Image: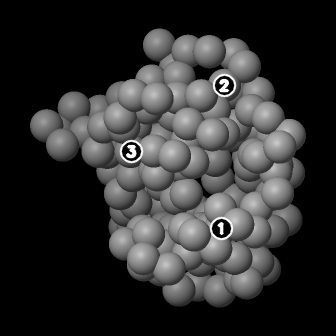
């Protein structure tokens, strides 16, 4: 079974549903060896490999090829879909796909931690209003 590890805007039920059609709730998971930073001038984050770091997110089951096509469109050329190992709250580890910042775009990071709660409080509404790509799906 293919799984998606989401660590940013796709943790929001409305956004993951709009983008991919996934309607089931995500399962809490942690990705070790990566750090999540704000993308300069944007409401969304990116992750990059970083020893000793960890990123909290949600794990979704995603078996529909059309959902993956839509996710790839949403993430665009700025991210590479990569297979990673995540850890669930019970300590179980499993493989999942996630979107890692393409090395060519490292200069887009402002190296401040991206905060999901802050996004929900401020950035989510602005992101939903500003993001025009939903119509592509």
Instruction: Report the front residue among 53 and 5.
Output: 5
Residue at 82%, 51% in the rendered image: 133
What distance separates the C-alpha of mark 2 from that of mark 3? Answer: 16 Å
Image coordinates for residue 108, horizontal then vertical, percent: 76, 78
Element class at badge 3: strand
The residue carrying mark 3 is: 58
Examine the rendered structure and indicate whether residue 62 appears above or below residue 28.
above
Residue at 51%, 34% in the rendered image: 4
Compared across the picture, whether 86 is left or right of 7 comes to left
What distance separates the C-alpha of mark 1 from that of mark 2? Answer: 21 Å
What distance separates the C-alpha of mark 3 from that of mark 1? Answer: 19 Å
Residue at 68%, 27% in the rendered image: 68
The residue carrying mark 1 is: 127
Colour pattern of the rendering? one colour
Q: Residues within 10 Å of mark 2 (few under 14, many from 20)?
A: some
Element class at badge 2: helix
Image coordinates for residue 88, horizontal then vertical, percent: 25, 39
Compared across the picture, whether 103 is left or right of 87 comes to right
Image coordinates for residue 115, horizontal then vertical, percent: 43, 75
Q: Residues within 10 Å of mark 1 (few under 14, many from 20)?
A: some
Q: Residue furthest left?
A: 90
Q: Quadrant of residue 37?
A: bottom right
The residue carrying mark 2 is: 67
Answer with mark 1 or mark 2, whichever residue precedes in sequence.
2
In the picture, the quarter occupied by the C terminus is top right
Q: Residues within 10 Å of mark 3 (few under 14, many from 20)?
A: many
Residue at 58%, 62% in the rendered image: 47
Answer with mark 2 or mark 3, whichever residue precedes in sequence.
3
């Amino acid at each position: 079974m293919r799984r998606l590890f989401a660590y940013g805007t796709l943790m929001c039920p409305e956004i993951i549903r709009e983008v991919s059609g996934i309607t089931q709730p995500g399962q809490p998971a942690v990705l070790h060896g990566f750090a999540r930073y704000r993308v300069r001038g944007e409401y969304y984050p990116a992750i990059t490999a970083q020893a000793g770091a960890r990123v909290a997110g949600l794990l979704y089951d995603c078996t529909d090829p059309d959902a993956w096509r839509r996710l790839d469109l949403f993430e665009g050329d700025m991210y590479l879909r990569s297979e990673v190992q995540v850890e669930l709250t019970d300590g179980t580890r499993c493989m999942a796909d996630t979107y890692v910042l393409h090395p060519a775009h490292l200069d887009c990071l402002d190296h401040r931690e991206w905060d999901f709660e802050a996004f929900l409080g401020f950035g989510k509404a602005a992101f939903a209003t500003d993001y025009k790509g939903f119509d592509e799906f």
